Image (cartoon, rainbow, N blue to C red):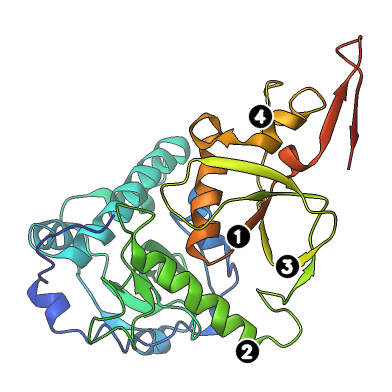
């Protein structure tokens, strides 16, 4: 989450041009994509590699785990890398116990040389990997990964760094400004797959979310395919049976107005988002579909 904090760098990171890290050679990327799965982000073997190419892979980082640990006391980058390094060491310790592998044990000794380097994951991402070469095993170990970010688009480096800090308040105005820019860019750049369509025939029933942020009475409207724009909520209902929905018994009540506060939080968030995007109508399947419950409570039938 975004917060005020000292983002200083250690002497090692200060000497590195973090905006121009060399890209990892694609010919060695045998497990491309799997590094972002948590259970596989500890150690990947990407060999074989030629020893004379090692110096061309990336930028020299810390030599030992202890160097990284000491630098993390006042360096934001090293703190991020250290989290992955701890997991890496724990995984190696478990592997060493299972296999009684003396080579792996050498990685765990105090002062053992890891010779870490920084490489960019690929040309089209800002993800930076921390890797270590293992000449004896003809392997490349993934120690950790991090990504640079700036606070917002007003930062001088915002044009070079795509990452942004997460806001503590998900309804912060800057978030919706960014969403609006994404929609505009998508409509302009993706001729066949626009984010936002023009006026269409509205579904049979939609929620009229209003235009005022303080409006809490949300009406279910039967618009019967009138032209207009609307947002649609895609979500999981969950495992329980007591879902918030429209039935034949509650249809007229929902048309008179639903107190927003009694809705599930997902619905409330969707209403706020719809308003902030400048849309009047929201489609939610659980409220659009009228559910008939027969005498047998296990028999249900929905009508559009």
Q: Tell me the number on the disc at residue 134.
A: none
For discs 1 and 2, the disc positioned in front in the rendered view? 1
Q: Kindly indicate whether the residue at mark 4 contacts the one at mark 1 (C-beta within 8 angstroms).
A: no
Residue denoted by label 1: 280
Sooner in the amino-acid sequence: mark 1 or mark 3 = 3
Tell me the quarter of the picture where residue 85 sits: bottom left
Residue 131, image x, y percentages: 36, 69
Q: Nearer the viewer, residue 78 or 292?
A: 292
Give the crowd class for mark 4: few <14, some 14-19, many >=20 residues within 10 Å.
few
Sooner in the amino-acid sequence: mark 4 or mark 2 = 2
Residue denoted by label 2: 189
For discs 1 and 4, the disc positioned in front in the rendered view? 1
Q: Kindly indicate whether the residue at mark 3 contacts the one at mark 1 (C-beta within 8 angstroms).
A: yes
Residue denoted by label 4: 244
| Residue found at x 40% / y 36% | 97
For discs 4 and 2, the disc positioned in front in the rendered view? 4
Residue denoted by label 3: 228
Sooner in the amino-acid sequence: mark 1 or mark 2 = 2
* Left or right of 10 in this view: 127: right
Sooner in the amino-acid sequence: mark 4 or mark 3 = 3
Sooner in the amino-acid sequence: mark 2 or mark 3 = 2
| Residue found at x 65% / y 51% | 233
Q: Kindly indicate whether the residue at mark 2 contacts the one at mark 4 (C-beta within 8 angstroms).
A: no
Give the crowd class for mark 3: few <14, some 14-19, many >=20 residues within 10 Å.
some
Secondary element type, mark 3: strand
Whether residue 64 appears in this view of the structure is no
**Alpha-carbon distance for marks 1 and 3?**
9 Å
Q: In which quadrant of the rendered image does the N terminus lie?
A: bottom left
């Amino acid at each position: 989450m975004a917060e005020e904090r000292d983002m200083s760098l250690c002497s090692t990171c200060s000497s590195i041009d973090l905006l121009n890290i060399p890209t990892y050679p694609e010919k060695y990327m045998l497990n491309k994509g799997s590094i972002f799965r948590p259970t596989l982000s500890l150690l990947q073997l990407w060999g074989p590699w030629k020893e004379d190419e090692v110096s061309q892979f990336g930028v020299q980082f810390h030599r030992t785990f202890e160097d990284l640990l000491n630098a993390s006391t006042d360096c934001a980058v090293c703190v991020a890398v250290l989290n992955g390094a701890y997991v890496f060491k724990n995984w190696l310790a478990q592997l060493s116990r299972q296999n009684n592998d003396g080579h792996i044990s050498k990685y765990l000794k105090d002062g053992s040389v890891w010779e870490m380097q920084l490489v960019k994951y690929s040309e089209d991402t800002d993800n930076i990997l921390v890797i270590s070469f293992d000449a004896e095993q003809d392997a490349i170990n993934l120690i950790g990964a991090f990504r640079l970010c700036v606070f917002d688009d007003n930062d001088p480096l915002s044009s070079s760094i795509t990452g942004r800090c997460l806001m503590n308040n998900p309804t912060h105005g800057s978030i919706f400004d960014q969403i609006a820019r994404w929609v505009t860019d998508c409509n302009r750049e993706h001729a066949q797959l626009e984010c936002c369509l023009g006026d269409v025939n509205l579904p049979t029933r939609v929620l009229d979310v209003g235009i005022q942020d303080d409006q809490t009475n949300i009406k279910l409207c039967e618009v019967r395919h009138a032209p207009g724009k609307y947002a649609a909520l895609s979500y999981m209902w969950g495992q329980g049976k007591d879902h918030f929905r429209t039935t034949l018994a509650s249809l007229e009540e929902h048309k008179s107005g639903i107190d927003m506060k009694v809705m599930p939080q997902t619905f409330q968030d969707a209403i706020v988002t719809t308003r902030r995007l400048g849309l009047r109508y929201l489609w939610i399947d659980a409220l659009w579909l009228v559910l008939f419950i027969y005498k047998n409570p296990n028999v249900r039938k929905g009508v559009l």
